[in-house]
Image (cartoon, rainbow, N blue to C red):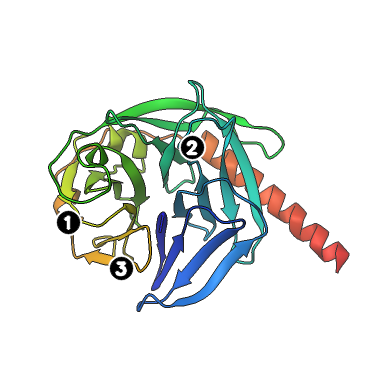
Amino acid sequence: ASGLAVDGSRLLMVNDGGSALEVFVLDRSCRVTSVVTSPVDPYDVEDLARAADGTLWLADTGDNDRDRDTVALYALREDGQSVLFRFTYPDGQQDAEALLLDRAGRPFVLTKEPQGRAGIYTPAAPPSVSAPTALERVGSLTFAATGTPGGPLGQTGQVLITGAALSPDGALAVVRTYTDAYLYAVTDGDVLSALAGEPVRVALPPVPQGEAIAFAANGRDLLVTSEGTPFDVTVLPAAASSGSAAVEAVDGNSTGVNLAIAAVLAAVLVGVFGVLRRRS
């Protein structure tokens, strides 16, 4: 799996590739119970986040060859209705596999950099469904090789960001590489300031290509898995507990873009549902 999220006792999972948006819903035994799908052909979906209102956000941001003119975020409802938002980078094409969605709905895209200095990008203006919206670079993350075994690329894999998640209560953020997870305490919902702080590192179990990570519903356990089949979802009990008291974040808040995203999404979905009702 490329992306992982949790909804109560349900596990939500996305793969990269494919010719439609698909989110697989799994029970506690990792049995697929349903598939949320929309007939949209994405380019390279790499991560998944679940908003407070239940909307699923898919990060179509993969760009191994760095030749995409735009990247995309899809807002997908469980009834299959989806909305596409396209974005452009301010500094050329980027490959990204990690999405953080704060509690207010503001997205942060984290790039995948072989040198370990990843960019943090967020919309510079309220996103539009009619034209691409510019992203702005608002920060960076720098990781060093750790020596943790696993992953496909040796020391390089130890610094490449492959996934991210926010805890259900918004108190913790986690960013992962192929081999390690980095936990950040979030104060007053300010994810960006949290990412500027010192993280607590957790070495992850070695797997061939670990990309997905999520917090369990209790906000303390971490769930991780790898691409490829067959796959296991590994639970790291209370892995987040060590990080919650060890990191401080700068106070702050930014809600303008968040509220605008929510307003645009609501308007588009109302329009879609209105058309469907008129056609029925």
Q: Which one is closest to the eye, mark 3 or mark 1?
A: 3
- Against 193, residue 15 (above or below) is below
| Rendered location of residue 35, percent (x, y) | 55, 70
Camera-side residue of 240 and 163: 163
- Report the amino acid beneath label 3: Asp
- For marks 3 and 2, the one nearer the N-term is 2
* Sooner in the amino-acid sequence: mark 3 or mark 1: 3
Q: Residue at x 54, y 57 (%)?
A: 55
Tell whether 142 sits left or right of 127: left
Q: Helix, strand or loop at disc 3?
A: loop
- Residue plotted at (80% across, 62% down): 276
Q: Amino acid at mark 1?
A: Ser
Residue wearing tag 2: 63
* Residues at circles 1 and 2 in contact by the CB criterion of under 8 Å: no
Q: Is residue 165 visible?
A: yes
Category of crowding for the residue at label 1, using alpha-carbon neighbours closer than 10 angstroms: few (below 14), some (14–19), many (at least 20)? some
Q: Quadrant of residue 138?
A: top left
Residue 6 against residue 107 in the figure, above or below: below
Decide: few, some or many residues near mark 3? Use Cα within 10 Å; few <14, some 14-19, many ≥20.
Answer: some
Q: Secondary structure at mark 2?
A: loop
- Is 172 on the left or on the right of 246, as rendered? right
The residue wearing badge 1 is: 241
Occupied quadrant, residue 274: bottom right
Say what amino acid the circle numbered 2 marks. Answer: Asp
Residue 185 position within the rendered picture, expressed as x and y whole percent measured from the top left: 24, 44
Inter-mark Cα distance, 1 to 2: 34 Å
Indicate the secondary structure of the residue bearing disc 1: helix
Reading the image, the residue beneath label 3 is: 232
Earlier sequence position, callout 1 versus callout 2: 2
Whether residue 251 is visible: no
Quadrant where the N terminus lies?
A: bottom left
| Residue 169: quarter of image | bottom left
